[in-house]
């Protein structure tokens, strides 16, 4: 096990994830062009056909399964471009990835954020 | 002879730029953060540097996964704000200084830092938000800016030691420059934050405050800090803090701490700002 795997709820964007997620993240990157955003919004399935995505990557986009995107090799700075295209903030997708609502998440952040205590390692988390 | 007169470190949270662009800085959520930026803006206006070297990371804007330069330097006349998925920020074009940038690139490479040289690139929030934080909303930025980007998106980023040593090499390069320029170096990113996964929203204020204090007084502890400690303690995206070490490496060993500001949260992130001046200034 990679030492980083002991950190809970964290998907280090390492060599394996870059390899697995390359085409997926490059699809996300394409959304930095206004015309591509328009094409994607007009026909998501058709737009995704242009990219070599795995079935789980493709489905995670269609479902806006933000955590699923990360697990399928997506990098947050790339998947966030889908969120931007949808008109959502980083905070919105961070809330959904951590299994809560935007309002609850925002409140947690205003109250000082997610505590490090209990979140350093899987063993600590128990 | 050119010389580095001061260093400033700051977070570069995109939401800070959006709050400014949308005129929300006076809202209760944002006001405490922006109040803390006032002294830094006054300090910068008084310092009036001739040039800024701005150490930041690109977030899949100018670069992508196609090519991942560990260290890159922009040598262009100008750099346009990037479209990150919601259109470019309404901020001034960033003017470079090709003569200085090429000198810096040459000097660093001959000093064994294998820089990627970039003639054409946009700059994203990683670069424009720090400028907004320290300059406010001017019609044009106060001086030329040299973008120096560090990969912190793809693991592994450069080590803290490598970043610190790059700062040392920048300092040598600046001293070798004939023109009489007063240079400010900015290190950006951080502080503790995690944007992805079930652990998103992680904040570790104890880690951040030690980082702020030690960067001034005992940077060696941070130079030796391994990547896993950043990821574990400061969140996966908190690894951006290695870029603050480039700034610190470019300064004298002994510095004067001018100002420190820390606030939680800006969106998902703990924000810090630190100003250090060289004693020789």
Image (tube, coloured by chain):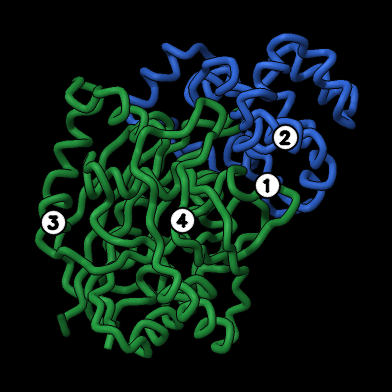
Q: Which callout, 3 or 4, points to the residue nearer the camera?
A: 3
Do the residues under discs 2 and 1 have CB atoms within 8 angstroms? no
Of helix, strand and loop, which one carries label 1? loop
Q: Position of residue B38 (x, y in %)?
A: 13, 44
Label 1 – label 4 distance at C-alpha? 15 Å
Mark 3 falls within which chain?
B
Q: Which callout, 3 or 2, points to the residue nearer the camera?
A: 3
Mark 4 falls within which chain?
B
Q: Is residue A53 above or below residue A75?
A: above
Q: Position of residue B78 (x, y in %)?
A: 44, 55
Do the residues under discs 4 and 2 have CB atoms within 8 angstroms? no
Question: Which residue, given by chain and number where applicable, does mark 4 sit on?
Answer: B56
Of helix, strand and loop, which one carries label 3? helix
Q: Position of residue A33 (x, y in %)?
A: 63, 30
Please state if B161 lies on the left or on the right of A18 as rendered: left
Q: Which colour denotes chain B?
A: green
Please state if B3 lies on the left or on the right of A76 as rendered: left
Mark 1 falls within which chain?
B
Question: Which residue, given by chain and number where applicable, does mark 2 sit on?
Answer: A74
Q: In this view of the protein, which residue sits in the foreground, A47 or B140?
A: B140
Mark 2 falls within which chain?
A
Please state if B259 lies on the left or on the right of B162 as rendered: left
Do the residues under discs 3 and 2 have CB atoms within 8 angstroms? no
Quarter of the figure that contains the C terminus of chain A: top right
Q: Which mark is residue B210?
A: none
Chain identifier, blue in the render? A
Question: Which residue, given by chain and number where applicable, does mark 1 sit on?
Answer: B64
Please state if A125 lies on the left or on the right of A53 as rendered: left
Label 3 – label 4 distance at C-alpha? 22 Å
């Amino acid at each position: 096990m990679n030492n980083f795997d002991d950190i809970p709820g964290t998907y280090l964007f390492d060599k394996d994830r870059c390899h697995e997620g390359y085409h997926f993240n490059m699809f996300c990157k394409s959304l930095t062009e206004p015309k591509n955003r328009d094409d994607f919004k007009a026909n998501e399935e058709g737009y995704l056909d242009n990219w070599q995505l795995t079935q789980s990557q493709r489905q995670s986009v269609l479902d806006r399964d933000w955590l699923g995107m990360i697990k399928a090799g997506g990098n947050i700075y790339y998947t966030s471009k889908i969120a931007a295209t949808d008109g959502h903030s980083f905070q919105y997708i961070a809330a959904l990835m951590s299994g809560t609502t935007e309002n609850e998440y925002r409140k947690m952040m205003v109250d000082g954020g997610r505590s490090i205590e209990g979140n350093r390692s899987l063993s600590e988390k128990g | 002879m050119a010389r580095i007169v001061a260093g400033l470190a700051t977070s570069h949270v995109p939401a800070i730029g959006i709050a400014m662009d949308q005129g929300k800085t006076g809202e209760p959520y944002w006001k405490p953060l922006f109040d803390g930026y006032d002294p830094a803006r006054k300090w910068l206006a008084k310092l009036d540097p001739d040039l800024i070297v701005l150490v930041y990371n690109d977030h899949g804007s100018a670069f992508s996964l196609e090519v991942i330069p560990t260290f890159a330097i922009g040598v262009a006349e100008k750099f346009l704000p990037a479209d990150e998925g919601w259109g470019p920020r309404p901020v001034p074009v960033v003017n470079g200084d090709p003569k200085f940038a090429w000198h810096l690139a040459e000097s660093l490479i001959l000093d064994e830092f294998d820089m990627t040289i970039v003639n054409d690139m946009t700059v994203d929030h990683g670069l424009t938000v720090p400028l907004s934080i320290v300059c406010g909303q001017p019609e044009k930025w106060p001086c030329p800016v040299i973008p120096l980007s560090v990969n912190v998106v793809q693991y592994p980023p450069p080590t803290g030691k490598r970043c610190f040593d790059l700062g040392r090499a920048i300092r040598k390069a600046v001293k070798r420059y004939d023109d009489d320029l007063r240079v400010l170096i900015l290190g950006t990113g951080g502080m503790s934050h995690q944007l992805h996964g079930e652990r998103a929203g992680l904040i570790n204020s104890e880690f951040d405050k030690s980082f702020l204090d030690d960067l001034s007084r005992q940077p060696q502890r941070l130079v030796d800090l391994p990547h896993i400690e950043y990821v574990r303690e400061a969140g996966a995206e908190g690894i951006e803090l290695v870029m603050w070490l480039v700034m610190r490496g470019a300064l004298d060993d002994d510095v004067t701490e001018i100002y420190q500001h820390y606030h939680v949260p800006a969106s998902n992130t703990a924000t810090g700002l630190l100003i250090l001046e060289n004693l020789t200034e």
